[in-house]
Image (tube, helix red, strand yellow):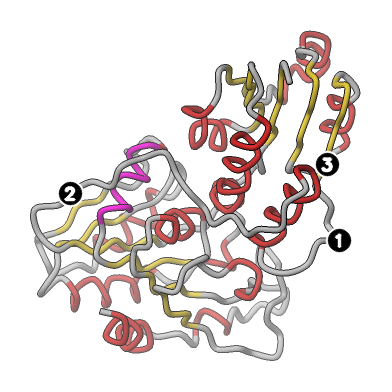
Amino acid sequence: MKSLIIEPPTWLGDAVMASGAIRALLDEIRPKRTILFGSFIATELLKSWFDEVMVIDKKHKFKQFVEFPRADVFVSFRRSFYSKILGLKAKDSYFFSKSLKGHMVEKYSNYVNSIIGKNQIYSPVLPFKPKKFQKPTIGINPGATYGSAKRWYPEEFSKVANELGKKYDVIIFGGPGEEEIAKDIEKNLTIKNYQNLCGKLTIKELCENIGGLDLFITNDSGPMHIAAAFNVKIVAIFGPTNYKETSPWSDNYRIVTKNLECAPCMKRECPLGHHRCMKEIKAKDVLNACKEIL
């Protein structure tokens, strides 16, 4: 095959969960020219595997369509109308189907299997080396890009950090726009052995730092899936989202959730206005989960 264009999922967590399937697709097809087309976050995560990278230009979609390269095969892990239009420029096009069942890693694997004729599950794999910390280190990740309903409370994260900080160095993670949440955690910290790296890391640096941790305490988020890809121990806090579909793809984690009858609602904000799925989770619940896995 001469050329292959791959469009990964948009969000960081989905791109991580699809990474193993994308790597398998590249290894099986072995095209002479590979192009990665997608969101800035997804392309930053996977770009080292490709010959060329194109970032989606939301403001100039028509211009990008006109200039979009032709290819032998276009494989999209998205379901947008724009993706299907772009696929018209390729000899053969494939699009991810929402009818696939199971965990997202299984869905992405089965999608690629339908293209290459295999029957395997492809665990996430990332092209970065974990950082080596001088002391045992834990990470806390209070953000969640999809919406506020997925976020546990900063004051509870602080309680967990203060307790675990007696034995471990602590790093606060987070992406651009989540700096205030990280600062709210800092306000309640009594320990001194911590760093606030929220909003300060590239995708590569984020992966390298998370990959070297002894434990990662996190909301359901993209960084959670990065930790799973490196087999870092994880305590994952779930409220409105479905942990059966998006739990860490690993055997090295604990889920903290209250399993309320209104969950998983899959909403960005609590539709009932009480946010009990997160408010009822306390620091002691998370610390107990940490003790189980450490």
| CB under 8 Å between discs 3 and 2 | no
**Mark found first going from the N terminus, 3 or 2:** 3
Residue highlighted by disc 2? 132
SS class, disc 1: loop
Estimate how packed mark 3 is, as few (under 14), some (14 to 19) or many (20 or more) residues with alpha carbons within 10 Å: some
Q: Which residues are magenta?
A: 204-212
Say left or right for 242 vs 257: right
* Disc 3 residue type (three-letter): Phe
Q: Residue at x 58, y 20 (%)?
A: 53
**Mark found first going from the N terminus, 1 or 2:** 1
Q: Residue at x 35, y 76 (%)?
A: 156
Judge by depth and name the residue closer to the eye, 275 or 81: 81
User: Picture coordinates of residue 168 (x, y %)?
Assistant: 14, 68
Q: Quadrant of the C terminus?
A: bottom left
* Disc 1 residue type (three-letter): Ser
* Disc 2 residue type (three-letter): Lys
SS class, disc 3: strand
Is 205 within the magenta?
A: yes
Residue highlighted by disc 3? 95
Say left or right for 43 vs 191: right
Label number found at residue 99: 1
Separation of disc 1 and disc 2 at Cα? 41 Å
